[in-house]
Amino acid sequence: MALIELKDVSKLYGFGDATTLALDEVSVTIERGEFVAVMGPSGCGKSSLMNVIGLLDRPSHGNYKLDGRKVAKLRANRAARVRRDTIGFIFQSYNLLPRLSILENVALPLAYKGVSVKKRIRQASTMLERVGIQNREYFMPSQLSGGQLQCAAIARALVNNPKLIIADEPTGNLDSESSRLVMELLSEIHKTGNTVLFVTHNPELTRYATRVLYMHDGNIIHDEQTAIGQVAATARKVLYTLPTTNEEDDLAGVSALMRARPDVPSVGRKVTRPKSRSTKKAASKRKTSVRRKKADV
């Protein structure tokens, strides 16, 4: 049985003439244990897809099954329980509470689940050891680097032992070294049997995935199986190819600039500027002086 099943799922935002179609009849199936990357340009519907899969948002149309259960029309409180027990979230901006220690942040999901203080602190500490920052568990979020904060966010996502990990641009705010650390952690999580679904703009990160989905205008336009350790072929082709321009493109760009900035002079065209009063007076004096000299001659 597949873990995620979406059939003809659409998501609309707004009303009337202001309606935006974020997802357009998306159908996709994700099996247990897959490591799936979702790629596409900004505004193509990646985050909307993650929100629907993560039960943060409801589809406007279509059917959604999570772990064999129809969840598209669950009531808010029931959806919250399913989300808490089944899904772990990792966000680009970490979303750690600044007034709680790292240990308290990681233990927070267990508090909502009703776990005793002693047990949840022990589980949170064990999870921080797993991601390699147990020696920072009593630090505040402001005292950690970006990579350490994302490791703490991963520990918080894992502390409930979820079946699905959803990571929305988990390396978007990190340097290359911290990005590799985070992706290696996600890879280790995947190897233990978890299903991982992550959004990225970086084609290099498809090396960690077993499957890549490409989105455009609210649709999944390509679905590619890929070998771990290799950049996905379509990601390399689409995102590594630099666009080329010709002379017509350059002229069109200059023309557009001139329409937007009419005060900017064209190259090779003489610009006449209106003379000020002081300039006019000086010119008049020069003309009078020349006439006098001619009369004296």
Image (cartoon, grey):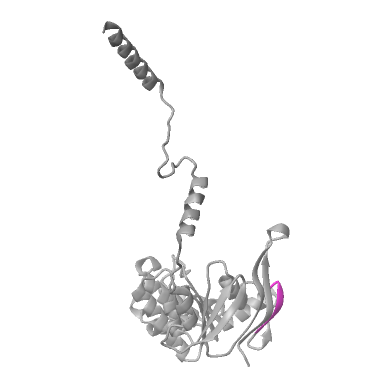
Residue 142 lies in the magenta-colored region: no
Tell me which residue sits at (56%, 83%) in the image: 223
Tell me which residue sits at (40%, 43%) in the image: 268
Is 185 or 224 nearer to us in this picture? 224
Residue 55 lies, in percent from the top left, at 62, 76
**Does residue 219 appear in this view?**
yes
Tell me which residue sits at (66%, 89%) in the image: 68
* Horizontal side of residue 61 vs 137, given as left or right: right
Prevailing secondary structure of the magenta residues? strand
**Does residue 55 appear in this view?**
no
Is 4 or 247 nearer to us in this picture? 247
Residue 287 lies, in percent from the top left, at 34, 15
The C terminus lies in which quarter of the figure?
A: top left
Task: Give the residues in magenta.
Answer: 59-65
* Horizontal side of residue 285 vs 191, given as left or right: left
The quarter of the displayed image where residue 46 is located? bottom right
Residue 206 lies, in percent from the top left, at 45, 81
Q: Residue furthest bottom?
A: 1
Is 16 or 87 nearer to us in this picture? 16
